[in-house]
Image: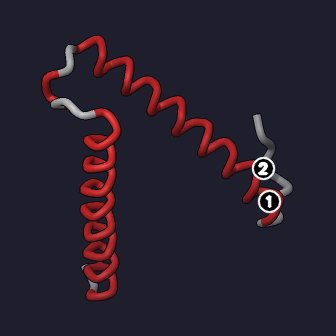
Amino acid sequence: MTKPQEAHLAAIKARFCAEVDRKYRKGQREHGGDLFRLNISSLLREIKQEILDLYVYADSLEALILPAAGEKNLKRE
């Protein structure tokens, strides 16, 4: 990879690690307990909720950026 690509990757990794640390600590403050001790059903339920949140965020972003970017040929389905 090129030096700019390496720098880009390093910046992404640094932001990711910082965000994981922040999110984990916030979750511990809010919910407590040991995440790795949750049962499988609880973990699956939480994953599904996160997926739903992600879809809503992506759909909302799409509704905002496509018209602003002049993407008239792209239709929302």
Q: Which residue is mark 1?
A: 71
Residue located 32% across and 48% down the image: 26
Above or below, 52 relative to 10 = above
**Residue 28 x, y percent position in the rendering:** 26, 41
Nearest the viewer among 54 and 33 is 33
Quadrant location of residue 22? bottom left
CB atoms at circles 2 and 1 under 8 Å apart?
A: yes
Kindly state the secondary structure of the residue where label 1 is placed: loop
Which residue is farthest bottom? 3
Above or below, 61 relative to 4 = above
Q: Amino acid at mark 2?
A: Leu
Marks 2 and 1, how far apart in space?
6 Å
Q: Give the position of the N terminus as an image quadrant.
A: bottom left
Residue located 80% across and 64% down the image: 68
| Disc ID at residue 74 | 2
Kindly state the secondary structure of the residue where label 2 is placed: loop
Please indicate whether residue 41 sits to the left or right of residue 52 in the image: left
Q: Give the position of the C terminus as an image quadrant.
A: top right
